[in-house]
């Protein structure tokens, strides 16, 4: 979500703001609080001083970099729960965007990791987008040469997917 490898005008935040205004007539001001390489722990550590006042929605999508480092899913879930609790205490809506581990991490890790997001959405009664990279992951034409970070075509798909969830939240 930080826009790794892309010019600023191709970042997800820029595209999402444009899509919300153009297709859903929502006057949105998207603030990209992402940091490339962020883990759930680093996101939690900087949340209090980076969370702006007077915002309506946080799109929470942390955990992918934790997974790439093989961090225990219980630790990831605990960090994300703390983040959710802080955001909810400020009366801010949350859209939790899930990530999925690849099969190469093993059946047990994949299952435990993939369940984090669903469980948190149910336990906290927050809106849940099951897979942020739906339609983009593993598609070489929608990703940068590293195969992990979306290119602008991929960003457009992710933005469109996110916009549909945000539009539902605005009603």
Image (tube, rainbow, N blue to C red):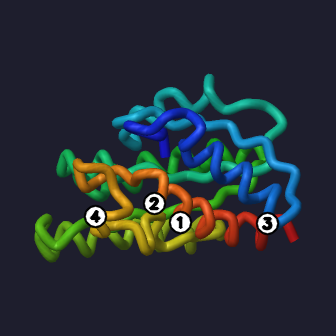
Q: Does dot 1 land on a helix, a strand or a loop?
A: helix
**With respect to residue 78, does 154 lie above or below?**
below
What residue would you read off at disc 2? 154
Earlier-in-chain disc, 3 versus 2: 3
User: What is the spatial separation of the Cα atoms under label 4 and label 3, in whole angstroms?
Assistant: 27 Å
User: What is the spatial separation of the Cα atoms under label 1 and label 4, in whole angstroms?
Assistant: 14 Å
User: What is the spatial separation of the Cα atoms under label 3 and label 1, in whole angstroms?
Assistant: 14 Å
Residue 171 at least partly seen: yes
**With respect to residue 44, does 125 lie above or below?**
below
Q: Residue at x 47, y 29 (%)?
A: 45
- Looking at the rendered structure, which numbered label has been put on residue 23? 3
Earlier-in-chain disc, 3 versus 1: 3
Q: Residue at x 24, y 50 (%)?
A: 145
Q: Residue at x 71, y 42 (%)?
A: 30
User: What is the spatial separation of the Cα atoms under label 1 and label 2, in whole angstroms?
Assistant: 5 Å
Q: Does dot 2 land on a helix, a strand or a loop?
A: helix
Q: On the image, which quarter does residue 11 sit in?
A: top right
Q: Does dot 3 land on a helix, a strand or a loop?
A: helix
What residue would you read off at disc 4? 140
Residue 71 at least partly seen: no
> Seen in the image, is 20 located left or right of residue 11?
right
What residue would you read off at disc 1? 157
User: What is the spatial separation of the Cα atoms under label 3 and label 2, in whole angstroms?
Assistant: 18 Å
Q: Is 121 in front, or is 17?
A: 17
The quadrant of the picture occupied by the C terminus is bottom right
Earlier-in-chain disc, 4 versus 3: 3
> Seen in the image, is 51 located left or right of residue 12?
right
């Amino acid at each position: 979500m930080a826009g790794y490898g892309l010019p600023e005008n191709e970042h997800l935040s820029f595209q999402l703001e444009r899509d919300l205004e153009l297709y859903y007539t929502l006057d949105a001001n998207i603030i990209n609080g992402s940091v490339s390489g962020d883990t759930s722990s680093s996101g939690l550590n900087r949340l209090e001083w980076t969370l702006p006042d007077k915002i309506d929605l946080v799109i929470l999508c942390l955990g992918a970099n934790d997974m790439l480092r093989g961090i225990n899913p219980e630790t990831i879930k605990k960090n994300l729960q703390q983040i959710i609790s802080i955001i909810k205490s400020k009366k801010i809506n949350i859209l939790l965007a899930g990530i999925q581990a690849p099969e190469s991490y093993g059946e047990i890790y994949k299952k435990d990791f993939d369940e984090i997001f669903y469980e948190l959405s149910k336990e906290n009664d927050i809106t849940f987008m099951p897979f942020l990279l739906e339609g983009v992951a593993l598609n070489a034409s929608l990703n940068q040469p590293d195969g992990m970070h979306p290119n602008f075509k991929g960003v457009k798909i992710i933005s469109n997917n996110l916009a549909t969830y945000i539009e539902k939240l605005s009603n």
